[in-house]
Structure formats: C-alpha cells, structure tokens
Image: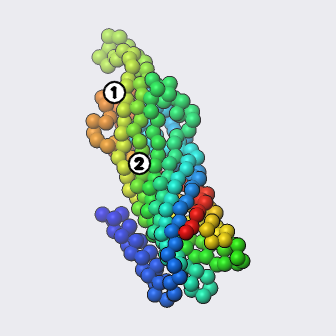
Amino acid sequence: MRKSNTFKTLVLLAAFVSAGFGANAQLTHLEQSLYLNFNMPTAEFNDDIANNAFGEQIPMTRFNAGKDAVFGFGLGYRVSYRFDVGFGEVSPYLHGDFQWNRVSGSTRDRYMNANDGSSPNYFNIPIYIGVNYRYQLTDIFTPFAEFGIGPDFFMITKESGKVQVPDYSAPGLADYVAAHDYEFKLRYQTTTNVAFQLGVGCYFGQHVSASLHYNGYGKHAIKYKKADDIQSEPWLAGADASTTATQTRSVGMLSFRIGFHF
C-alpha cells in the first residue's frame, strides 16, 4: 500500500509541474518521437550468477533470476508539447520504452547443453511522464536535459532444460536418491515498480537527437508465476530454500538513445 501511495504522489507531482509550465508559456506545437535505445545493464541486473545446490548455474531459480543481463536493445515512443518560455523550450512528455536484455553467452551455452534448453530473457517496459528542457545554441545544435518518472513492468521469460543430477547420499540410506535426469521449466511473474530516467543530449537540427540516459527501475520482486512452477526435486528445492520467500533485484541501465522527431 505504501509503494502504491508513493507512486501516485510522484505521478501527481510530475503532472502538476508539467501543468505549471503550460500555464505560463505559449504552446508552439505537438511533437512525436521514435527512439532506438542501446542498453548497458547496471546494479544487480548485471551481477554474476552464483552456483546453486546442483553445483551449477542452471536452472537459475529465484536465486539467480534477474541477474547476468548483458548489452541489449530497445525501442521508444514519445508524445510531447513544446512551449517557448523565453529562455529556451520546455516539453512535458509521455514516453514509453520496450527494452530487451538477455543473459550472458556462457549462461546461454549452459542452457543449450541442457538438452537444447531455453534461457530466460529480460524485458523492461517503463512508461514515463516528464519534462524536457532545451536551449538552442545554433541552428544545428540544441542541448537538452530531461527527467521522467512512472511505472516499470519487468518480465522474465520462462527457463527450461534438462540437467543430470548425481547420486545423493549413499545406497541403503533413507535419504538416498539415485542419479537421474531432471527436466525443469520455471516461469516468473511480471512485477511493477516506480522507475525514473535522467538524460542529457543534443538535437541536431529539428529532427534528430542523440543522448545518454540513466534508467533506474527500482527493486523488483522475483516470484514464480504459480506454486507448482517449482517442482519437487530435492536439489532444486535446496537451492530455492536457500533464499527468502521473495528475492529482490535492483534493476537499472545506461542507455544511448538516438531519436527521430516529427
């Protein structure tokens, strides 16, 4: 409940700031923008994954899911109004991104070796409201800075494969489990958290821009989609029990963004 109230408060504050600019400035025109994003993960999103109870790094389970992200790509769309405020232009905006990152090549190889298994992919879909400020230095160069805030939807695709499980304990003992193949398929919930972006860059003429952004997506809870997604495998249960009921990941990324404005 506290997180929901915080998000609503932040959204209302951003809306009031945007409205305040509009009340004291002259509307110039509506602008639409398309973006290509090139993303480098930061924070726990980029952490190395650790061995689980199998002595391997797959299946990832909640213990590792949401880590090991590598360079990714994304697309963005924005609609904004440009206001001339006398000392530059201010543009309140609504912006959405679709960001994709996958896990490292070494992890993907482990899934391929696990009976052509499927490694998880990560998707972030943030929706920002914010403000862009630009100041035209010349006919060609217009530097800008911007800030946005809103919800981020974090999705982890399913992971699947088959691994070889060694003997556990010793024959004749009550807890003995013979070596066998374990086939896994784990699915994760989509989670939501408050996100923000900070960016600086430059417009080149009226229709092209380049910028560097930091996207902070907050701490996302890592949960299975439903209870039976975690199967009754002693080694997997051991790996899962080594974590708390809810794992969290601090997700963020640096983005180089190329924009096309109309």
Residue 113 image offset from top left, x and y in percent: 50, 24
Judge by depth and name the residue closer to the eye, 52 or 254: 254
Q: Is residue 252 visible?
A: no
**Disc number for residue 44:** none
Q: In the figure, residue 10 lies in which quadrant?
A: bottom left
Residue 42 image offset from top left, x and y in percent: 56, 52
Eyeballing the image, is 213 above or below 8? above
Q: Amino acid at mark 1?
A: Glu
User: SS class of the residue under badge 2?
Assistant: strand
Mark positioned earlier in the residue sequence (2 or 1) = 2
Distance from the alpha carbon under mark 2 to that under mark 1? 25 Å
**Disc number for residue 233:** 1
Q: Is residue 70 visible?
A: yes
Identify the residue at horizontal 32%, vertical 43% (top origin): 225
Identify the residue at horizontal 31%, vertical 31% (top origin): 231
Mark 2 is surrounded, within 10 Å at the Cα level, by few (under 14), some (14 to 19) or many (20 or more) other residues, namely many
Eyeballing the image, is 233 above or below 170? below
The coloring applied to the image is: rainbow
Judge by depth and name the residue closer to the eye, 170 or 111: 111
**Disc number for residue 155:** 2
Q: Is residue 167 left or right of residue 31?
A: left
**Quick check: marks 2 and 1 in contact, CB under 8 Å?**
no
